Image (cartoon, rainbow, N blue to C red):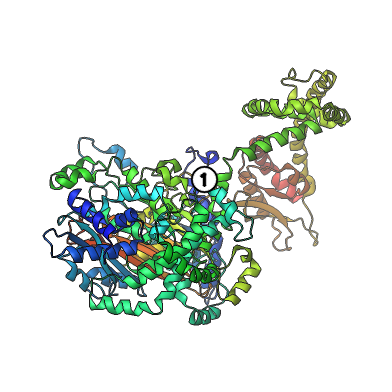
Amino acid sequence: MTPSFEIDAKNKSYRHQYANIYFTRLIMLKNAVEERARARWGRLANEPLYVARVLDIVKSQLCWVIGTVYMDMPLKPNVLEDIGRDHSIPVPPPREKFYCDEDSVMLEDESGRIKLVGDRVAQEHLVTGVIVAALGVETPTGDFEVVDLCTAGLASFAEEEVVVSDDMDTLLLHSSSPTQDEYVAIISGLSIGSSSSEDAQIQMLVEYLTGEVGGPEDQQLASQISRLIIAGNSLSLAEYGEDGEAERKPRKFGASAQAKFSPHPNIALSAHLHDLTSALPVHILPGADDPSGVILPQQPFPRAMFGKAASFEGFHCEPNPAWLRIRCSDEPESLVTKEGITSSSQSGHLPVTRSILVTSGQPILDMYKYLPTPPSSLVSIAASTLRWRHIAPTAPDTLWCHPYRDRDPFVLRETPDIYLVGGMPQFGTELLGSEDGTIRGRYCRIVLVPSFSQTGILVLVNLRTLEVRRVDFGVEGLSASGGEHQPSGEVGDSITEG
Amino acid sequence: MTSTRAKDFLTKELFIKKNVVTFRFLSRELGIHVNDAKNELAAYLAETATTDTPSFPTYMVSGLAPLSSNGSSVDAMDTDCADQSVMRSKIVLVDSDGLQDAKLQFARIHSVYIYSLSPSVFRDAYLVCEPTASVRDIDAKGNPALNGKIIGAHVKARRGPPKNTSTASSSKMTLDAHKPVAAQSIVLPRKSEQVAEKVKHDGPKDNDHAKSLAGTKEPPKPTGKLDWSKAKAKEQETTSGVHGKDKTKSQPNQETKASPSSAKLADKPPRNRNFGPQSKQSAPKPAAPELKRVPKRKSPDPSDSDVNVEDQPTLKNQKAAPPATSNARVKNGIIMSDDEDEEIPCKPRRNKTSSFERSLEAMMDIDDDQVVRMSRLSSRRPDDEMDDTPDEIDLTDAEIPISSAAEEEEEEEEEDLKPQTKRRKPKKVVPVGRNGLKKCRVMKSRTTTDAKGYMQTEDYSSYESVSEEEAVPGDAKKSKGKKKTETKVEDEAGEKLVQANLKIKETNSSRPAKAKAGKLPKRGGILNFFGPDKTKK
């Protein structure tokens, strides 16, 4: 049902051309887009003509066509530029944003491409690789003047809905709701081993999750956390980085300096993981900074890497985008069947199964470069990916990904209940419902999980209500290796304002 | 207030060993609950504050942060992003100087307690991590659940023989014979803690708030102590059964006191607390296929795959011995391994001559057709283990070349014949419409999606009946000419033969198609030349 992001030996071939991905994606999403576009434009006064292929567009007639968006951006990294570069000149740093005024939006399919123009295109904030339907007229210059755009919209939800909300309400009234709640904890960016890693905060985090920190209320909340997901960047890329380290070393030199540098960051991580896995199940995903491949479905860490932590059954190494399916219920297992749902609802405990999609954030950060930020934020981009039914549309273009031949695992056949994005500069969340009301009453909780080492934020998502809590870990008055005040906003602000 | 044991220990650590002592370290060393350890630290600090050897506390403040106040742009932004408020807890580690400031950040303070004591004021927060190593050591030896570590239900060691034995013992409690039961029993400590807390929450909770709001540094002792003692008792019951490595450090008199209540609780918790641990425990099970966890583990399991490997060959052997060898040849790498694997399991089976004989009989009964196919493969390397069936090989060797050769010849003949028949057909077949006029060729195009998902547009021409006014010979001429020049490829010969009046053009690169593609344009030219005559006739 849900695609597997693991690449087995059979498919581990890098010979294929990337064009296949675009083609597969178009085939997979075309029907969904077409269906939605027909519903949207079918009742227009003079029903616009559906043209099956981009090149078949009829001149000066209102028609619509489905294709893949390609953003032609002069600032986008170009392999030809890399090759033609004068190597005596140092490589310019990668740009924060690609977009500029000369960008043009193309719509292409297997037959050809056409340039989309019009204000509507700019409003839609498209990125390369999105499948859209465009309604409009071909202009004399050969461009396609777009009147309206239509994307695939939210896919149906992966899990069946919890029985009835009415029951839920009444239940919540008479049974103490907080005790029924079950949380999933998400962190990202522990960045163990970096020069600015916040050992004290990580220590507090571990103690919090094991239920030792805080008063009874904190401990009760901690005891309701049923699972921890580590969404990437557990280890720091610049662990013994030459540049950054050299600058900071003088400042850091002192009594604590020797103590800070553990023999190997992985040992420190494993020790923390061991503490955690002995208390609750842990899922760990590789991220951009982790010692893992950069090609996008990042494969799970080798289990043996984590020493004693690997000896627990509750420790799971996941691939980078990962689907998890988590069931929370108060019923004994014997009742967890179809009948179990009804019987349990009577007894006041609804079993809830939630599908969770986790990524370490690379796709969102890549799309972020395509779009001017004031209108579109990281949260809105994450929401868009759900509406596009594709979590990494820029994948073969500017985001490295495996050359899949006959499938595109990033296409969302189903919408997850919880969509977690790690590695973000700041915290953010949104509850996304379907626009046109086709799926009523179902929402997807989007959570952007910021880097723990920079913000000290642990995110808790209530599996039952999809409510989000955040727990900030901070150190004050102590030179907590950079965590003196809550630095949560610094990075986020610069990005959102930029 | 502080026990002499704690006091001795703290004095020794702080002023002789000059170590930082965190509440966790203390709880591990003394074998007490973390919440008790927090109280001990506070008591020790209060006692020694006025002496000439003061220790320096580091506080931890936990509570709820204000939703959108504080005026910081971060908060404003968060609320912008989130259309609904996000409850925000905060836990801050702070030294004694900054404590008051830190408290101002909270909208509601859950607790303020001493995280650690140190012999001197320290400036680097990392120092609080130093006792962690020894804490881990002690945790590894003992049972951290006794110290207040909340351990989830399904937390199990991966392949721990001791745990398995414990499942057996604990399975009495929960009548289910399945493995997960073990997890359930482990769960209980966490549950009981929870419940105990919950029970307590009704009353003392409010007191706590009042206290904490008043800004007392005292940790919420009553709740902590009472809860945990009960919990501990419960834990001990369960965990001692489960783990078998119970720490007997905790107070026995409390245990007895609490036992009735814990017994009471024992019924409740499974329901109340289950959702936490149990769901966790249940989650992996139903979700196993999706999570890919179970298959992942099972696949490496050698027993399964071995069984399969063994079974398949035996089946083959029984059905027909030759096929096995022929299969083996197809994939050389596999065979080699198969042979190696087979040698051991198969030999005993062959000794049971009955089955082997049966297989031989079965082989003899095989129809000639089947034998031909199998041995055709084997004929490439006929020397393997086929000693007992040499005549069959001969037969098949002889037959196959003949048949294949014959087929090829036939095919060639067909190809030769087809164009000829086609050449004649246009002349014959131009259909006549109902009005007596010959039908006219019309160009059409249709779009289909082929098996691979490619959209293909085919231009084809077909006859359509013409009304009398339109029946101008010139039209027919033109259309035919177009058609012929554009006609390139035809891949389905059968279809063409059947539907003589329908010509489909597709770009396809199969072998017969190419051959025709070469011929068709020529013919098109010729036919074009002769076309007018035809239509006029």
Q: Residue at x 56, y 57 (%)?
A: B287
**Kind of element beneath mark 1:** loop
* Left or right: A207 as drawn, with respect to A15: left
- Percent x, y for residue B313? 73, 32
Q: Please, which residue is most extreme toward the left here?
A: B52
Q: Which of A329 and B499 is in front in this view?
A: A329
Callout 1: 10 Å neighbours few (<14), some, many (20+)? few
Tag 1: residue type? Gly
Q: Quadrant of residue A238?
A: top left
Q: Is residue A82 visible?
A: yes
Q: How many marks?
A: 1
Q: Give how far across and how far down residue B195 sits, in percent.
A: 46, 70
Q: In this view, does A350 lie to the left or right of A118?
A: right
Asked whether residue A217 is in view, the answer is no
Which residue is at the front of the view, A467 or B402?
A467
Taking B489 as reference, is B434 left or right?
Answer: right
Taking B138 as reference, is A57 above or below it? below
For residue B443, what is the image quadrant?
A: bottom right
Residue that mark 1 sits on: B160
Q: Position of residue B224 (x, y in %)?
A: 36, 69
Which quarter of the rendering shows the N terminus of chain B? bottom left
Residue at mark 1: chain: B
